[in-house]
Structure formats: structure tokens, C-alpha cells
Image (tube, coloured by chain):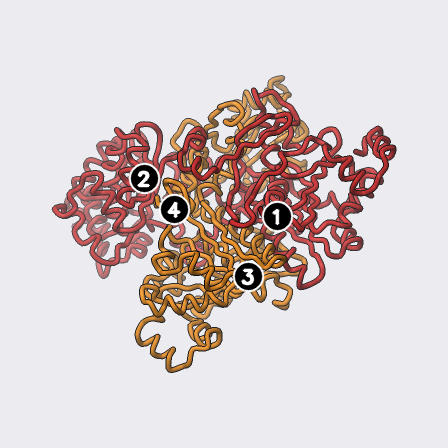
């Protein structure tokens, strides 16, 4: 598979991002052909190099799966940005880049001397991308927050949880991935625009607003009716059954959603049309929704006798949406995902061929180029010598003095 | 104002409900000319799902549809008729992108699959968004947000931090997240293909799976499983959060609920043994060799976990949450009635705030805010000195601190807490209700909600742009279209069909 089929070959990204939201975006650029130069401190490394899991539990910045999951196919160059000479090197990288991207708190890039005016002067058609929790403007722009603060402020947190209970935390770095995906699209659109006009611009992402864009039904209900929607667990407004049911065995569950009369009758039939299901109240979608507590009890009495897999196959066979609530083990071993080649195992020089998630789409021509996440500073020489033409003696001095660390 | 970033793209969208339409909206709001093909009479199902003003169903007033279809033009077309399919081909012939989210067999059944369409337009980028993708054993299955989210592992690991009762099922996040995630993923993949076209001088087929799109947010948990499976707790009763707390024996039933145990040090386990096995446990043959050699918790638990768990359970089962945690606290055993472990929601006077302290200085500030005298308190000695370790800190002190933090928060409002915390650089923000979003001075200042006037639904505030492009901002030139609003404009003016042809197609239900 030639890299020449990838859309971003020839695009260089100067990447100051760390943690998850920014790296999520730059990983997509990297696997689609861009040359992503991850600028990190050799001492205060990307936090994910210091977050478990480590290969076989061995704590080591080069064995952190947490880092590898969002930094595939990038280059790493270590610069101590507290040193003026390092900032000068960064400026040289920026001068030959197409995109500069960061997810520091507001003001950090400015303190490095890399404010947007300076960058635009260095390289007028640059695309300048930043993401923060609250955005670059507004009275709360300097508030600190991460993933959970972003989705909580954005309204999604309060909608996640069991009915009549406190809100529940969403698994993982949800808002980071969500905002990182939108940031990727926005940046690609800016690149597309530059392709036809030659003009660069800045792209700004607020994680709070990105999350709020994913709850429009609730926002529009308030806009229309001043109706404040609450947490409803796995249920859905107006639709029943729509929940997760206990199955045979310990802590095994299946999700079932019959979203139309046709699906409801198919579900009934699959259960064997028991007497309770003749109840008139269950004949209309309104009736099913209003009596869903009872309806769910009946369904769970059935699902309890089978494994999630058995329930899923029985229902899917008759066209009812159903699927097991998977553990991570089940996800990684899932035959469907494996047949689609979803997982990747780049050959990392230290941890070997460890399995990670790939890209969630398939293109008939442009296949992602998956390479291992970089070792700390592995591309220093390439960046300094090949890209910036800095003589070897000078590189040696920069390293000795810790400018390149 | 410059034209939109995607103003040169013509997009045909044959999409229903959320995933494909959100992909189309992202492009339309940046200027792409998106022609939405809807079924005659019934239209997009999003027109039926609401919310509606005063809860009265009206195909032109569904809030979901209005949001998802800004800036698009609507054409009604029955693709099952030959004439309808022919018109569709005419539209696709000059399009840059086709977005569709039908079942994988549908387009082929209509003779409108990628292989057929590329013959009439080799530069076409066709993006298909489906629950499980175009290939693989589940490709023919039915799916939706609930099913895809549960099959991704996200639901099994929500709530993060574990459940406090076996009765609680795995949980999906609010609203229909995976539909939107599939849409934004599709928008990225589509743009990659559009940009590749410049190099290849050819389009391609892009296959987006909603299931994979949401599973892709489990990257950390998957890495846990493949790098260090022992570190990944996958019994839900245990702490399921991922950052986090390599602890076994975590949630334990007690008389009136659950208590949570987070021992990590030898001294804590020894104190626990004293508590559950009596003072002379060291003389008991059963425990011979328990703490010999260097302490390695993982090895310790794999050898002794099965022995200890029933003993601890027997002890906790006889006590209430309050009794158990008070006794444990006196012995410096990290056991508490609170399941909070550091990251999480804090109940307060008027709702919840969320606290995400990760760094030592943030915890120092939070503890000082709550009223701890850190200098004089032995329990904190050395914890913040060098190389702060969040896991160690929380496992040692979290269960003791968190009830105090909760007590502090209880009597204060979200605003009081947030202002006090943020003044010290502590990452705490309010957990906003939908009403709060409308009232937020910050979001108002940023003009996040935008007012859009629609001929039938009237003027309403919608969620605005998820990102800002300085030269080519998202903007809404047109509200969502009425069903078939642009039939004449697109088919008549665009494709040159006569008024008679249009009238006859209307009469026969083709448009």
C-alpha cells in the first residue's frame, strides 16, 4: 500500500499537543499521511507516557500503552521550551509546517513566545489549531478543566446516569475523543480551503461546546418548551423496550431496542408470544413506553435464561436490534471487528507487536498508514539535521546544553 | 465574509435520522451545497421523533430535524421507482460526495451502490455510515445508539468508578452519542477521501461503522487489556475506571449498602487483618508467610485475595456503612462508604459539581480550601514533596478525604464552589442542566447558542458551531428545509425538468 494514496502526504504538522484531545486529532493526520512532529519536553514528557497501562506492568515511559493509543505514526522531537534557543528551533519547524496545533491552557503558547501573531508572521498561510476546555474567549476562558469538566459543563454529564440517581461518570476520556474528532474535521476543512485559496486561518475548539453539540434533542426541547430533560439510564424518550437486560451467568447483559411496532411484534414472536405480551397496553408504542417498567420485567424474565449471545442471535435473526454489553476482553476478541481488521499491532521497538485500536472507517483506496508511536526524541536528528539543516556540531551542542533534551 | 471552507463541494445526502445527517450538517454549515434526498410524503424519520413545540408532532417542527439539517436543501425522491433512481443518478453525476446511511444491502438493491455510481462519476466520494460497517459477520444486523454503545464496551465501563449495586446494568451516556460520533467520524473520513481525490484523480468508497466509531473511544481500556490485562479490572463490582487504582477486594456489601476498600500498602493490609481476623492472627497457621519478603501487592493478592475476601465480607456484612468506615478510619485503613475516588461528582446545595484533580498541587489546593492544615497533618507528610503519584495518593488518603470534601461541598452552591476552586486553579466545574446551558454567561459571551428563524417552527435558539474557523466560520444561511422545499429549484432549474414533468412525478408519488 503506497503512501502516495494518502491525502495528507506533503502536509507537515508541528504538534505541541499532549494528553488526549490534541493527540487524537494529530494521530488521524499522521495515519493519513501527514508528517507530524510531536514536540515534547524530554523531562516533562507527554503525561500519557506516565499513565498506566505499561507493557506487563513495567513502569517505563516507552512502555505506556496510554501513550501509544493516540500517538501512532508520529515523529518525536524533544525540546526544552523554557530555553530561548529551543523556542527558536520550534519557530524554524513552524516556518516549514502547514499546521500548528496545541491544547495547552490559554496563554501557554504566548508565554513560549509563540502567540498567533508571531506565528502568522513566521508563516502567513499557516493553519493554527487550538483546543481548550472552555474556548479562547469568554469570561471563564481561563478555568481549568479536563474531560469530565468539559462534558459536565456542556450538559452531557447531567444527562448520563440512572433515573433518580446522581449523574454517572462516562468511561474513559470521552470529551477528549469527541472534541478531537470534531477538531480533525475542522482542520481538514481549513486545509481544503487553503488548497483552493492559499489562505490559512485559525481553528478554535472548546471541548464544552463540542460536547453540547451532541445533545441537540435535549437543547431543542428546552428551546421549544422550556422542558429540562433528565437522566433516563439506558432508556429513550418515547421508545420501549429500550434497555439493557440481565442474562444467564454472572454480570452478563444484553441491550435490546425495539423501536417500531414491527420490531416489537418480531420481539414478541421470538420470545414465543407469551400471554403477557397480548396485553393491550403493549400493543401501541405509547402504551409500551408508559408501561415500560412492567414490560422490562417480562423481558428480563426471558433474557435471564440465555446468554447475551443467544439473545442477540435470536433477536437479530428476526430483525430486532440487540447486542451484548461487551467487556473489553470481548471487544478485543470480537470476531466481527477482527474480520474487519479493526485492531492494529504496529511493531514497536520496545514493546513489540502490541494490539491497539485502529481507525473506525475503511476506505477503498486510502488505507491508513499505521506505524508505532515514537520513542521519546527518536526523530531529533531527522528534524534538526534533515529538516532544519543544523550542522552536526551544533546539534551536539544543543543536546549537551539540554536545549534538545 | 469569505465563502465557507467547503463552498466548492456539492454533496448529495441520502440519510435518515442522525449519523449521516450530522455528517452532512457539519459540511453544510461550512458552506457545502448539501442536497438532502428524502422519501416522498414521510421524509426523514428525524421529522417524526421531535422534540416538538408543545409536544404536538409536526414534520416541519421536529427539533432534532431542525438542528441536523440547517443549510441543506430538500428534494423528495422515491428511489425505488426507475424515474426516481434516474434523477438520483443525475444528481450524483455532478456531486463530489454522496453520504448515505442505509442498510448495507439497500443501495445495491436499488442499483445505486458504489460500483454502479462510480461508473457515472469516477471522482465520487461515497460515504456509507452503518451500525456495523459494510463487511463482517454483523454487517447485516440491525443496530442503533443503544446497541452500538453497549457492544463497544463503553457502556460496560460506565459509570466510571463502578456500580454500587449488582442490580445496575451497564449504562450508555445521555442522548444518542454514538450516532453523533459516527457522524463526526464520517465527516473526517469523507474529508480525507475528498483530499485524496486531488492526488488520485479518483473518488473512493468510505465505509464508516458506528460501532467502531464509538469503540474507538475505548483506546485506553483496550490498551489496558492488551498491555497489562491483570491491571484491568473487568468485574463491574470492582472499580472499573481506567486510570486508576489497581485494587482488588474493592466493593463490599455491608448491612445498609456497600463500602469500598482501597488498601495498597503492607501496613494497611496488616491493619485490615488485625480487624477481620483478631489480634493474634499472626500466630494463626492459616496465614503463615503472608507478609514475608518484599511486599508486592499484585503477588500478595493473587496468593491471599481469595482467603481474605470472605473474611472482610463477613466483617462488613455485620456493620453499617457508618460503623465500618468509622472503625476503619481509626485504624488508618482506607475503607469508606463513599465510592468517590478522586475524580467525580460532588453533591452540593443546588446540584452537582465535578472534580477532576490530577496533579499534586491541585489536591493541595483543594484540601486547603476544604480546611485541612496540610503543614501540621502527619497523614500528608511527604505526599506532595516530589514526584506526586495520584494513584498512591488516592488509594492512601482518598477514602478518608472524600467524605470530608463531600461535607464541605454539601452546604455550598455550585457557583460558590466553582469560583472558590477555580480561584486556586482546582479543576472543578458545575454539572450543568440544559437550563444552565441557556443561562451560562460564558456561553452567551461566546454566542454558542444561535437564534435561527424557521418559517414554520419560528425563531429558536439552537446549539451553534462545535468549532470556530476564523476566516470561514460556520454560519447558518438557511434553516432546515421543508419537506421537498427545493424540488423545483433543484430538479427544474438544476436538472432542467419541465413543470409538466415535475407535476406528473408529484402525482405519481415519485417526488
**Left or right: A393 in relation to B477:** left
Residue A156: percent from left, percent from top: 46, 37
Figure quadrant of the C terminus of chain A: bottom left
Query: In the rendered image, which residue does mark 1 sit on?
Result: B3
In front: label 4 or label 2: 4
Which chain is red in the picture?
B
Residue A271: percent from left, percent from top: 62, 30
- CA gap, disc 2 and disc 1: 50 Å
**Left or right: A206 in relation to B88:** left
- CA gap, disc 4 and disc 2: 17 Å
Q: Earlier in the sequence, mark 4 or mark 3?
A: 3
The residue lying at 70 percent from left, 36 percent from top is: B74
Mark 4 neighbour class, 10 Å CA radius: few under 14, some 14 to 19, many 20 or more = many
Q: Colour of chain A?
A: orange
Q: Are marks 1 and 3 in contact (CB under 8 Å)?
A: no
Q: Are marks 4 and 3 in contact (CB under 8 Å)?
A: no
In front: label 2 or label 1: 1
Chain name for mark 3: A
Name the one closer to the observer, B251 or B183.
Answer: B183
Can residue B318 be seen by looking at this rendering? Answer: no
Query: In the rendered image, which residue does mark 4 sit on?
Result: A146
**Left or right: A353 in relation to B296:** right
- CA gap, disc 1 and disc 3: 30 Å
Query: In the rendered image, which residue does mark 2 sit on?
Result: B340
Name the one closer to the observer, B290 or A217.
Answer: A217
Amino acid at each position: 500500500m503506497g503512501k502516495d494514496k494518502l491525502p495528507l502526504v506533503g502536509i507537515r504538522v508541528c504538534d505541541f499537543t499532549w494528553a488526549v484531545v490534541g493527540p487524537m486529532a494529530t494521530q488521524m493526520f499522521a495515519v493519513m499521511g501527514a508528517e507530524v512532529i510531536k514536540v515534547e519536553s524530554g523531562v516533562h514528557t507527554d503525561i500519557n507516557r506516565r499513565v498506566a497501562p505499561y507493557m506487563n506492568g513495567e513502569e517505563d515511559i516507552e512502555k505506556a500503552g496510554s501513550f501509544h493509543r493516540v500517538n501512532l505514526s508520529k515523529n518525536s522531537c524533544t525540546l526544552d521550551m523554557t530555553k530561548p534557543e529551543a523556542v527558536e528551533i520550534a519557530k524554524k519547524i513552524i516556518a516549514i509546517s502547514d499546521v500548528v496545533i496545541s491544547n495547552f491552557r490559554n496563554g501557554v503558547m504566548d508565554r513560549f513566545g509563540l502567540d498567533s501573531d508571531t506565528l502568522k508572521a513566521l508563516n502567513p498561510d499557516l493553519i493554527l489549531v487550538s483546543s481548550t476546555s472552555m474556548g479562547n474567549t469568554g469570561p471563564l476562558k481561563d478555568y481549568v478543566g479536563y474531560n469530565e469538566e468539559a462534558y459536565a459543563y456542556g450538559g452531557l454529564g447531567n444527562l448520563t446516569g440512572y433515573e433518580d440517581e446522581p449523574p454517572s461518570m462516562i468511561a474513559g476520556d470521552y470529551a477528549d475523543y469527541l472534541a478531537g474528532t470534531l477538531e480533525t474535521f475542522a482542520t481538514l476543512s481549513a486545509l481544503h480551503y487553503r488548497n483552493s485559496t492559499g489562505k490559512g486561518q485559525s481553528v478554535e475548539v472548546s471541548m464544552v461546546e463540542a460536547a453540547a453539540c451532541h445533545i441537540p434533542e435535549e437543547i431543542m426541547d428546552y428551546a421549544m418548551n422550556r422542558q429540562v430533560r433528565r437522566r433516563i439510564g439506558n432508556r429513550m424518550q418515547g421508545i420501549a423496550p429500550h434497555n439493557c437486560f440481565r442474562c444467564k451467568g454472572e454480570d452478563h447483559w444484553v441491550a435490546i431496542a425495539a423501536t417500531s411496532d414491527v420490531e416489537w411484534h418480531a420481539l414478541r414472536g421470538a420470545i414465543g408470544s407469551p400471554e403477557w405480551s397480548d396485553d393491550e397496553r403493549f400493543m401501541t408504542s405509547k402504551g409500551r413506553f408508559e408501561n415500560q417498567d412492567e414490560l422490562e420485567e417480562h423481558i428480563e424474565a426471558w433474557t435471564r435464561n440465555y446468554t447475551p449471545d443467544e439473545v442477540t442471535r435470536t433477536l437479530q435473526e428476526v430483525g430486532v436490534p440487540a447486542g451484548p454489553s461487551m467487556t473489553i476482553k470481548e471487544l478485543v476478541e470480537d470476531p466481527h471487528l477482527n474480520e474487519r481488521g479493526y485492531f492494529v499491532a504496529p511493531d514497536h521497538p520496545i514493546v513489540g507487536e502490541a494490539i491497539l485500536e485502529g481507525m473506525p472507517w475503511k476506505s477503498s483506496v486510502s488505507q491508513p498508514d499505521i506505524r508505532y508511536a515514537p520513542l521519546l526524541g527518536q526523530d531529533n536528528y531527522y528534524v534538526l539535521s534533515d529538516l532544519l539543516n543544523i550542522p552536526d556540531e551544533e546539534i551536539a551542542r544543543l543536546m549537551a546544553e539540554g536545549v534538545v533534551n | 465574509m469569505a465563502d465557507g471552507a467547503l463552498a466548492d463541494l456539492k454533496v448529495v445526502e441520502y440519510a435518515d435520522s442522525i449519523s449521516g445527517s450530522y455528517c452532512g450538517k457539519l459540511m453544510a454549515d461550512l458552506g457545502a451545497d448539501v442536497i438532502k434526498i428524502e422519501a416522498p410524503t414521510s421524509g426523514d424519520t428525524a421529522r417524526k421523533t421531535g422534540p416538538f413545540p408543545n409536544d404536538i408532532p409536526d414534520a416541519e417542527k421536529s427539533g432534532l430535524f431542525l438542528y441536523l439539517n440547517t443549510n441543506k436543501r430538500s428534494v423528495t425522491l422515491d428511489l425505488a421507482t426507475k424515474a426516481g433512481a434516474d434523477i438520483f443518478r443525475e444528481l450524483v453525476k455532478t456531486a463530489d460526495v454522496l453520504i448515505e446511511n442505509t442498510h448495507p444491502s439497500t443501495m445495491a438493491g436499488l442499483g445505486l451502490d458504489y460500483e454502479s455510481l462510480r461508473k457515472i462519476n469516477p471522482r465520487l466520494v461515497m460515504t456509507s455510515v452503518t451500525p456495523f460497517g459494510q463487511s463482517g459477520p454483523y454487517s447485516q444486523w440491525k443496530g442503533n445508539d443503544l446497541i452500538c454503545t453497549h457492544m463497544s464496551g463503553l457502556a460496560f465501563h460506565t459509570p466510571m468508578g463502578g456500580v454500587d449495586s449488582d442490580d445496575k446494568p451497564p449504562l450508555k451516556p445521555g442522548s444518542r452519542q454514538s450516532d453523533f460520533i459516527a457522524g463526526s467520524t464520517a465527516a473526517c473520513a469523507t474529508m480525507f477521501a475528498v483530499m485524496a481525490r486531488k492526488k488520485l484523480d479518483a473518488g473512493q468508497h468510505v465505509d464508516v461503522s458506528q460501532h467502531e466509531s464509538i469503540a474507538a473511544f475505548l483506546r485506553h481500556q483496550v490498551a489496558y487489556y492488551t498491555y497489562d490485562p491483570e491491571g484491568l479490572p473487568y468485574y463491574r463490582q470492582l472499580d472499573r475506571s481506567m486510570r486508576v487504582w489497581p485494587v482488588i477486594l474493592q466493593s463490599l456489601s455491608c448491612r445498609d449498602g456497600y463500602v469500598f476498600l482501597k488498601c495498597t500498602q503492607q501496613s494497611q493490609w496488616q491493619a485490615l487483618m488485625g480487624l477481620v481476623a483478631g489480634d493474634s492472627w499472626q500466630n494463626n497457621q492459616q496465614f503463615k508467610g503472608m507478609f514475608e519478603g518484599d511486599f508486592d501487592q499484585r503477588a500478595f493478592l493473587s496468593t491471599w485475595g481469595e482467603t481474605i475476601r470472605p473474611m472482610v465480607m463477613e466483617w462488613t456484612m455485620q456493620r453499617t456503612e457508618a460503623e465500618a468506615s468509622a472503625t476503619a478510619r481509626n485504624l488508618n485503613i482506607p475503607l469508606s462508604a463513599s465510592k468517590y475516588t478522586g475524580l467525580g461528582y460532588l453533591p452540593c446545595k443546588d446540584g452537582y459539581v465535578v472534580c477532576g484533580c490530577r496533579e499534586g498541587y491541585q489536591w493541595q489546593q483543594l484540601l486547603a480550601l476544604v480546611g485541612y492544615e496540610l503543614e501540621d497533618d502527619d497523614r500528608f507528610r511527604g505526599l506532595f514533596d516530589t514526584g506526586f503519584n495520584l494513584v498512591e495518593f488516592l488509594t492512601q488518603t482518598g477514602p478518608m478525604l472524600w467524605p470530608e470534601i463531600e461535607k464541605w461541598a454539601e452546604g455550598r452552591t455550585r457557583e460558590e464552589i466553582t469560583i472558590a476552586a477555580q480561584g486556586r486553579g482546582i479543576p472543578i466545574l458545575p454539572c450543568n442542566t440544559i437550563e444552565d446551558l441557556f443561562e451560562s454567561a460564558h456561553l452567551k459571551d461566546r454566542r454558542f447558542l444561535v437564534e435561527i428563524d424557521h418559517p414554520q417552527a419560528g425563531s429558536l435558539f439552537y446549539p451553534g458551531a462545535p468549532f470556530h474557523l476564523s476566516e470561514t466560520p460556520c454560519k447558518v444561511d438557511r434553516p432546515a428545509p421543508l419537506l421537498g422545499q427545493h424540488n423545483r429549484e433543484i430538479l427544474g432549474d438544476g436538472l432542467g425538468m419541465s413543470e409538466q414533468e415535475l407535476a406528473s412525478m408529484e402525482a405519481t408519488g415519485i417526488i
